Amino acid sequence: MRASPFVAVLALAVTPSVAMAAPSSAAANEDAAAGFLLDRFVESERAPLVLGEEILGSNVVRASIPRPPLALSVTSSMDCLHAAHDITLDPERGVTKASLELRVRASGHSLGAIGVVLDEGLEVGNVTAGGREASVTEGIVAPSRMVRIDLSPALAPGEETVVDIPYSGTLSCARPAKGAVACSKGASFSYFAHKSIFPYLFDPDAPESVTLDGMTRELVLRVPAARDVVVTGQKVSELVQGKTKVSKWSIEEPLSRVVGLYALVGDLGQKEVTGRTVPTTFFHPAPEMDVDRALVAWSGPALDFVEKMSGAKLPFERSLSLVRLPKSLGDPGTATFGMTLLSDSYSRTGPLMYEETWAHENAHLFWGIVVPETDPSESRLMSEGVATLTQLDYSYARHFGSEDRDEYLARRFRPMGLDLRLHGEDLPPAQLLPGTSAGSDFRTARYTLWAYFRNAIALDHLRATIGDDVFADVLREYGSRCRSVGCRPDVLREIAGRRSEKDIATFFDRWITANERPRVVIGFSPAPGGVDVELTKPDARPMTLALWLGLGDGRRLEKRVDLGPRTTRVRLDTPSPVVSVGANPRHDVLVDLRSAVDGDIDFDGETDGFDILRCARLVGQTYATKGAAGLWNVDETFDPRCDLDDNSAIDDDDLELLAKRFGTLRTR
Amino acid sequence: MKARCLLGAVTLAATLAIGCDSSEKEKKAAPGDGNGNGTRTQGDAAPAPATVFLRIRVAGDRALLDVIARNASRDVHGAAFRLGWAPERLTFVEAHVSDAWSSSAIHHAKEGLPGELVVVWSEKGGAAGVPASDETTLGTIELAVKTPGPTDVTFRADRSTLRDATGAAIPVEWRGGQLAAPRD
C-alpha cells in the first residue's frame, strides 16, 4: 500500500495565522503555505472534502469513488450509535492494550464493512460482530494502520449489531509525511489523538462521507497511578487501583463519529477557571508560561460570550477541559466534546489575536460540536462561519466597544472580502450543491477563504440584512433545533425567513448557493419631512438593504428597505433633513453599492472635496494581500471605495477618476 | 459693516463675516504675526480660535479672495470647502493654491451651481501637511464682479473641513467675508 495522508478527522479549526506570500501566484502561495506549521491542520480539516489520491488504490477501499468529490453524492450507510472504549496505556513507552465495543447500524442501505484507523504499531485481534462473520483486511499507511472489517452477512438497512475490536501493541507515534502527529509518548505532556489509541471510524465503501451519524461514547483510560490524565468528554470518575489510575469519561450527547478524541497524559499543569458554574480546568504542559495565565483569564469571558451569543448554556455539566498545546506537536488546536485545545504557537500573533482565536475555538464547543452540521462536506456555514463571527463579535465586545459596531465589523470584513475577491473569485459558494466540485486545488489558503471568510461574510451580510436582533433570535432557534441532531443550511434559511419575514430564499440564491456581488445604485432627493430614495439593481429579484440616512443634525438613521424590481422608489420619513443616503458598510463585501453620482463616495449625492480628501491621503497604498490573512488584520486602512479602477492600488489614476465629476452638485 | 479695512492698494475693502474689527484683533493676537513682537494684550489670554477666513481684495472687476488659516492645531494635509455668493453679483474665474502646498498637491475648484464654489486642496499620500498655526494662506480664489456693490461671500461650514494626515478633522471656524462698495 502506498503512503497516504488520508483520514478525515473532522476538525474544527482555528484559522492559519500565516502570512502567505506571493500574491500574484496561487502556486507561490501554496509553496509559502507549505512551510507553515498550522497548514497541516487545515489540510487535515479539509480532508473530508478532498480524499487522498492514494487511498483509492489501497486494499482497504475497494469502491470506485468519483473524483473530485461531489458533495452529497456518496453517503455512508454506517450509522455509529455508541462506542465503549477501554484503553490501558503506558504513556512512557506507548504500550497499549485496548478494546472498542461499537454498536453500529445500517442506515439507508446495507452496510458491509467498517473501517478503522489506528497507529501502525497497534494490531487488531480477534474481531467479533454479534454472530456475523467478521473478516479483517489491513494495510499500513505510515504511520497509520488501516483496517477493513467486512461483515457477512452485511447489515440490512435498519439492522444493527455490536462489533468488538480488540487491539494492542506499541504505539509508533511516528510523524507522517504530511499532517500532524497523532501521538507523542514518553514526554511529561504526552498527547494521544484520534488515529492513535482511539480508532478513527470510517465507511470503507464511502470513505468521503462524513454525514452526521450521532454516537455517544464511554471512555476508560488506565494509566500509571502517578500520571495526570485528561480525556475528551465529561469526567465521570477517577480512582487509583493499585498502581493504576482509572479515569472514566463520557460523551453523552450524540456526536459525529469523525469528531476528534484526545487524551493528554503526564505531569500536567492545571489551573481552575473561576467564575464558571461548571468545573472548568485549564491544562498546560510544564513549565507554565505567561500565556497560560492569559488563556485562563480569557476563558471565562470567552465561554460566557459563546453562551450569550448562542442563547444557551454549554451542556457540559460535570466538567470542561481547556488545553494549551505545545507548538512542537504541530497541532494548532481544535474543539471537541467538553474540550477545547489551542496551540501556544498562536501567541506569536499577539495577545489580541490569540485571545480572539481562543474565543473562536471555544465557540466551536457550541457551533460544530453541540450543534453540528449534518454534512460538513456540504457546508461549514454554521460551524466555521458562526465561530468566525463569534470571534469578531467577541473582540468588539472586549476591546473595541467604544467604536461604532457597524464600522468595526465593516473594517474587519474589508480585508477578508478583498482576499476573497483577489484569490477566491472562483471558489465554490458557501453551500456546495450536489454535483458541485470542491476542486482538486482546494488548498490551504483557498480552503480558509471558503470555510472561514466566505461563510462569516455571508452570515454577517445576512444579519445586516435582517437586523442583528432578529439574527440573534435566528441563531438561538437554530441552536436549539439543531442541537445534537445536526442541520443543513436549509434550516437556517427556513428560520431566518420566518423570523425576518423577508424573502430569504433569494438571499440564499445569491449568497449561499451562489457567489454574487450585484451592483446597487443609490440616488436620493430630500423631500419635506424625509427623503425620496431610488435604488437600482441589475435584476428583479428581491433584496433587502439596511440604508443609512445621514441627517443634517449629525445623526444617522438606519432603515431597512426591501428592493423589488430593478428600480425601487421609496419615501422615507425622517425627523430632520437628510444630507446623505448610503447603506450599512457591512453590506459592502457582497453588494457593490454606488452612488447615482459618479465620484460621490460618501453618498451625499454630490462630488466635492470630502470625497477627494477621503482618498488623497491614501494615495500610494496598495492592498498587500497575503493569500488568506484578512481575518488577522484588525486595522486595514486600504479603502476599496478609493480604488476606482479596482487594481488594488490607490493612485493618481483613481484621483483623476474621482476628479472627473468633481463639483457635481444637486440642484437646490 | 463696522469698519472698512484697507488692504494694500485695493480700492474695495473686505471684511470677515463677523466684522473687520474682529478680524484685525484676531490677526494681531495671532502669535508670530509680526504685529505683537511677542507682547500680549489682555485679549491674548485666551487662545485664539483656529480659523479659516477670507482676506478679500478687489481690483476693477476682479475680486481676489485669499483663503487663510491660522491657529490650526495640526498640519493641514487637505482642505475642502464650499463658498457661496449671490450669483447675479459674482462669478468664479479661477483658483490657485499657495506655495504653502507641495508641487504635487491636488487642487480642484468648480462652480458646481451658480454661486456655489466647490474647492479641494490636498497633499497626496504620506506627504507632509501644511503648518498653519501661524497665519497661512492656503490659496486664492478669483471672482469676476458682475455687479458692483456690497455682497457676502460665505463658507458652507457643513461642507468645509481641514484634515490632518490621518484623515481626522482639524477643528476650525469658517468665516466668510464681504465685498464692500468701492470708494469713490
Image (tube, coloured by chain):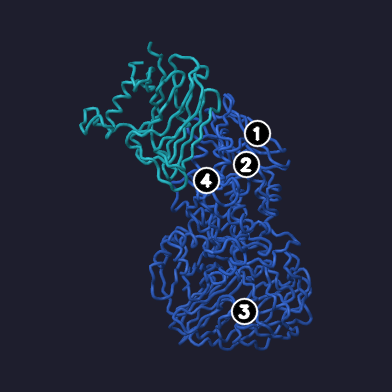
Chain colours: A blue, B cyan
> Which one is in front in this view, the residue at disc 3 or the one at disc 2?
2
Query: Residue type at mark 3?
Result: Pro
Q: Are marks 3 and 1 in contact (CB under 8 Å)?
A: no
Disc on the earlier residue, 4 or 3: 3
| Place of residue A325 in the rendered image (x, y in percent of width and height, measured from the top left) | 48, 72
Alpha-carbon span between mark 1 and mark 4: 23 Å
Q: Give neighbour class at mark 1: few <14, some 14-19, many 20+ (Cα, 10 Å).
A: some
Please indicate whether residue A644 sits to the left or right of residue A127 in the image: left
Q: Which quarter of the figure is the N terminus of chain A placed in?
A: bottom right
User: How many tags in the picture?
Assistant: 4
* Residue at (70, 65) in percent of width and height: A439
Vertical comparison of A141 with A386: above or below: below
Q: Which residue is mark 4?
A: A406
Disc on the earlier residue, 3 or 1: 3
Alpha-carbon span between mark 3 and mark 2: 49 Å
Q: Which residue is mark 3?
A: A199
> Which one is in front in this view, the residue at disc 1 or the one at disc 2?
1
SS assignment at label 3: loop
Q: Which residue is mark 2?
A: A545
Please indicate whether residue A302 sits to the left or right of residue A30 in the image: left
What is the number of the mark on residue A336?
Answer: none
What is the number of the mark on residue A534?
Answer: 1
- Are the residues under marks 4 and 3 on the same chain? yes
